[in-house]
Image (spheres, helix red, strand yellow):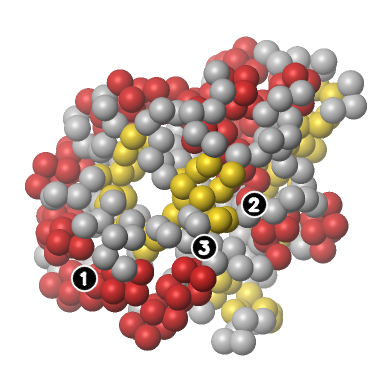
């Protein structure tokens, strides 16, 4: 089997939040082969579509003619045979190609990817909802949105509060975060897993204050309390706060995770398979976490394609904790031909070969790429309009 063509597909998927719609596109990669089989990967990296396309144009000559079943060899070629490492942009482009190769491997074998890796440890995957608040800060609106998410079958929730903060100590920010957390805890119940995402907004001192303010609400994790490269700061938060610390969505290599584990800065790794050089690197990260008695909870705030791909990692990692899933209450669920069905907080494993999902080309055609410089407004009635 040889790769004969690399095709990129961008789908306009603006995401509501704080009254605006982001200019987000889902970025898919299709690898076509001489045997008529096509592999699907995702490399969505918000606002960096042109950069991804440029990297793929540069790497294309290294990809065409390769056997996708030799995915480890191809990965090393793509990483090493260009001088510049490229950071998260190159890592995402390579991830999309690597993921498409695994899809081809599964399809060639006639098996789901997880069956090629020793079989599933579990037959259903627990997920938590992200993005369900839509940026809401008003308690009544939060309760309304929580009720809607609960009615959709979610039984675990992550929240964040994107408010300006003053470094070192900001009593108002701590109070507002605490109030939002209390409202959510009351709305979803005392035993429902609740996760808080700091998005790396805080320095270690403020993160510790916020962590202390949330401890009695029994959170499952505190994600990115500080920037991920501040390993000492994150380790200090982990030492001082009685909430499990998680990070990894912005890391792209195994070595970066190793440093966090060695410093005991995290106990939950969050690799994003669309950014961390793909599935095999994500699996290595899960195994490394296991060696440190830590857990893996893949990051996944993008399309149902990368969610379905992540389920294969969740299925085979013994130390899997919980899977992120963007709260989608619209057409985006149908970007794949068989939408993922949530039941009592769990997703079932795909059973078809490869990743078990395919793009719904009608949906692709109906939602063309959003180009830069086309800001869009999210009206209160849910409609979209130009500025």
Q: Position of residue 325 (x, y in %)?
A: 51, 53
Element class at badge 2 = loop
Which mark is on residue 132? none
Image position of 98 (left or right of 64): left
Q: Earlier in the sequence, mark 1 or mark 2?
A: 1
Q: Which type of secondary structure does the marked residue at label 1 adopt?
A: helix
Instruction: Residue 178: give its label.
Output: 1
According to the image, label 2 marks what residue? 340
| Image quarter hosting the N terminus | top right
Asked which secondary structure carries label 3, the reply is loop
**Could you say where residue 291 lies in the image, as x and y percent from the top left?**
30, 21
Q: State yes or no: discs 2 and 3 in contact (Cβ < 8 Å).
A: no
Residue 115, quarter of the rendered image: top right
> Is residue 22 found left or right of 298 in the rendered image?
right
Q: CA distance from mark 1 to mark 2?
A: 33 Å
Q: Residue at x 29, y 60 (%)?
A: 191
Residue bearing the label numbered 3: 153
Q: CA distance from mark 2 to mark 3?
A: 12 Å
Of label 2 and label 3, which has the lower sequence position? Answer: 3
Give the spatial CA distance, label 1 vs label 3: 25 Å
- Left or right: where 216 falls relative to 36: left
């Amino acid at each position: 089997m040889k790769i004969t063509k690399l095709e990129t597909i961008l789908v306009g998927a603006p995401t509501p939040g704080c009254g605006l719609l982001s200019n987000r596109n889902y970025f898919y990669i299709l690898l076509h082969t001489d045997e008529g089989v096509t592999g699907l990967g995702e490399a969505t990296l918000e606002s960096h579509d042109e950069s991804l396309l440029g990297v793929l144009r540069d790497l294309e000559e290294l990809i065409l003619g390769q056997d996708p079943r030799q995915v480890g060899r191809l990965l090393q070629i793509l990483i090493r045979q260009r001088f510049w490492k490229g950071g998260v942009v190159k890592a995402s482009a390579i991830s999309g190609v690597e993921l498409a190769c695994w899809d081809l491997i599964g399809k060639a074998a006639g098996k789901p990817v997880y069956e090629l890796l020793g079989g599933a440890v579990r037959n259903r995957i627990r997920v938590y909802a992200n993005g369900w608040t839509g940026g809401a800060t008003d308690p009544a609106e939060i309760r309304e949105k929580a009720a809607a998410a609960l009615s959709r079958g979610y039984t675990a929730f992550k929240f964040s509060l994107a408010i300006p903060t003053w470094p070192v100590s900001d009593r108002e920010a701590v109070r507002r975060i605490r109030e939002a957390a209390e409202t959510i805890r009351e709305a979803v119940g005392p035993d429902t897993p609740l996760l808080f995402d700091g998005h790396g907004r805080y320095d270690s001192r403020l993160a510790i204050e916020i962590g202390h303010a949330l401890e009695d609400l029994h959170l499952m994790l505190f994600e990115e309390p500080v920037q991920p490269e501040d390993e000492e700061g994150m380790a200090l938060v982990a030492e001082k706060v009685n909430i499990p610390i998680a990070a990894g969505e912005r890391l792209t290599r195994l070595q970066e995770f190793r440093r966090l584990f060695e410093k005991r800065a995290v106990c939950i790794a969050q690799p994003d398979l669309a950014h961390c050089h793909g599935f095999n690197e994500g699996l290595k990260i899960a195994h490394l976490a296991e060696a440190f008695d830590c857990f893996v909870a893949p990051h996944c705030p993008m399309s149902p394609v990368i969610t379905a791909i992540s389920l294969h990692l969740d299925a085979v990692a013994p130390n899997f904790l919980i899977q992120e899933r963007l709260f989608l209450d619209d057409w985006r669920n149908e970007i794949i031909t068989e939408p993922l069905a949530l039941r009592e907080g769990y997703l079932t494993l795909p059973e078809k070969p490869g990743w078990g999902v395919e793009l719904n080309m009608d949906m692709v055609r109906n939602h063309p790429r959003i180009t830069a410089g086309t800001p869009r407004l999210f009206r209160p009635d849910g409609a979209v309009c130009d500025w």
